[in-house]
Amino acid sequence: MEVKLEIVKVEKPQDLNIIIGQTHFIKTVEDMYETLIASSPTIKFGFAFCESSAKCLVRFEGNDEELKKIAVDNALRIGCGHMFFIVLKNAYPINVLNQIKNIPEVCRIFCATANSVELIITQTSQGRGILGVVDGSSPKGVEKEEDIRERKELLRQFGYKL
């Protein structure tokens, strides 16, 4: 049996957040839509799910055509069974991550980020799977007093701290 490894880079505008995970049932498409739409009155999103049996289609939902296209295009390129790809606008992963984790069909979250992302994909004779995720860049040092001050200001600017 042969196993191939491939790196697949996520393609998205820099300012958008994504969540990549694994789920096990086609019901996720409607459950994810309901979960995301209920999370915020201003959220915009696209969702794609790679069905891994029967028709093996990329199923999709969302409330923004551009974001749905980004999600579908990335799901097709990644091409792993039962993986899902969410693109968010006007919301951050922190706003929806716990609700997503509570969807009964969701098995795991690989990443939730606005960073540049590369997925490490394996290919066997049966199909493709996600082995891991490279999220952003490696550390370049340890924060100093100015960096701490900037971090705290940023959290307050986003409204996550008072």
Image (cartoon, rainbow, N blue to C red):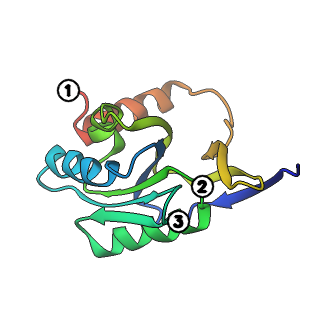
Q: Nearer the viewer, mark 1 or mark 2?
A: 2
Above or below: residue 72 compared with residue 101:
below
Q: Which residue is mark 3?
A: 74
- Local secondary structure at mark 2: loop
Q: Which residue is mark 2?
A: 80
**1 and 3 marks in contact (CB < 8 Å):** no
* x, y percent for residue 11: 55, 66
- Local secondary structure at mark 3: helix
* x, y percent for residue 7: 73, 56
The disc at residue 162 is: 1
**2 and 3 marks in contact (CB < 8 Å):** no
**Is tag 1's residue or tag 3's residue first in the polypeptide sequence?**
3
* x, y percent for residue 81: 56, 53
Q: Nearer the viewer, residue 61 or 113?
A: 61
Crowding at label 1, few (<14), some or many (≥20) Cα neighbours within 10 Å? few
Q: Nearer the viewer, residue 78 or 53?
A: 53
Q: How far, Cα to Cα, is label 1 from label 2? A: 41 Å
Residue at figure coordinates x 48%, y 44% from the top left: 21
- Local secondary structure at mark 1: loop
Q: Quadrant of the C terminus?
A: top left
